[in-house]
Amino acid sequence: MKKSKLILPSLALAASITGCDPKSAESTNSSTSEEEVTMSEEEQRPSPLRKISGEINGKSVKLQYGAPSVKGREVWGDLVPYNVVWRTGANEATYIEVTEAIEVEGKVLEPGKYSIFTIPKENQAWTVIFNSDWDLEHGHFQYNENNDVLRVKVTPSMGTESQEVLSFEIADPGIIVKWEKMTLPISIK
């Protein structure tokens, strides 16, 4: 009988904690939710597969990416070389799905699914690429420039605090990519 008296308050506490949404105070122009895709033990991988979805100015946006960790490695210029196409994640290509036309850095991207690649540059704007081959099993190893739909320039910033795991966020100004000390804000309307 004592066990059941302890379980009910514990369940109520757990429900109240999980019911809190720290993202509810976000801007009215964008909102996001994130989930880590659950896999069986034999499918577990060092860079978990993540999916996020949300709205930017009332337009639905979904992203899927592999989330690598820094793990004490030198990221920029080493693990991720400068001046070379990067899948902007790990494992298969990162992709975005939009149901309506959006403006990315002032250029129109039609509805559809697109892989996202970047070309990191040292101390310069990066090239962000949207490619029609969105379902690439091996990311940049299968990248074909002939299928690029849109290329834009975005200037990253380097901060002082390090973020261990790569993340994508749907937040002002559109999509924000963060990893290690780098933040890449991609403007979307």
Image (tube, helix red, strand yellow):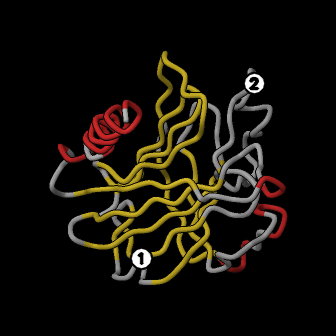
Q: Which mark is residue 74?
A: 2
x 18%, y 49%: residue: 27
Above or below, 131 against 126 in this view is below
Of pointers 2 and 1, the one earlier in the residue sequence:
2
Marks 2 and 1, how far apart at CA: 33 Å
x 72%, y 30%: residue: 75
Image quadrant occupied by the N terminus: top left
Q: Secondary structure at mark 1?
A: strand
Above or below, 125 against 96 in this view is above
User: Residue tagged by mark 1?
Assistant: 98
Percent position of residue 178, x then y: 51, 38
Pick the residue in front: 165 or 35: 35
Image quadrant occupied by the C terminus: bottom left
Task: Judge left or right: residue 35 versus residue 105.
Answer: right
Task: Judge left or right: residue 31 versus residue 110.
Answer: left
Q: Which mark is residue 189?
A: none
Kind of residue indicated by mark 1: Val
Kind of residue indicated by mark 2: Glu
- Evaluate if marks 2 and 1 touch, with contact meaning CB atoms under 8 Å apart: no
Count residues near mark 1 (Cα–Cα under 10 Å), then give few for <14, some for 14-19, many for 20+.
Answer: some
Percent position of residue 101, x then y: 35, 80
Percent position of residue 85, x then y: 73, 55
x 69%, y 29%: residue: 70
Q: Residue furthest front?
A: 1
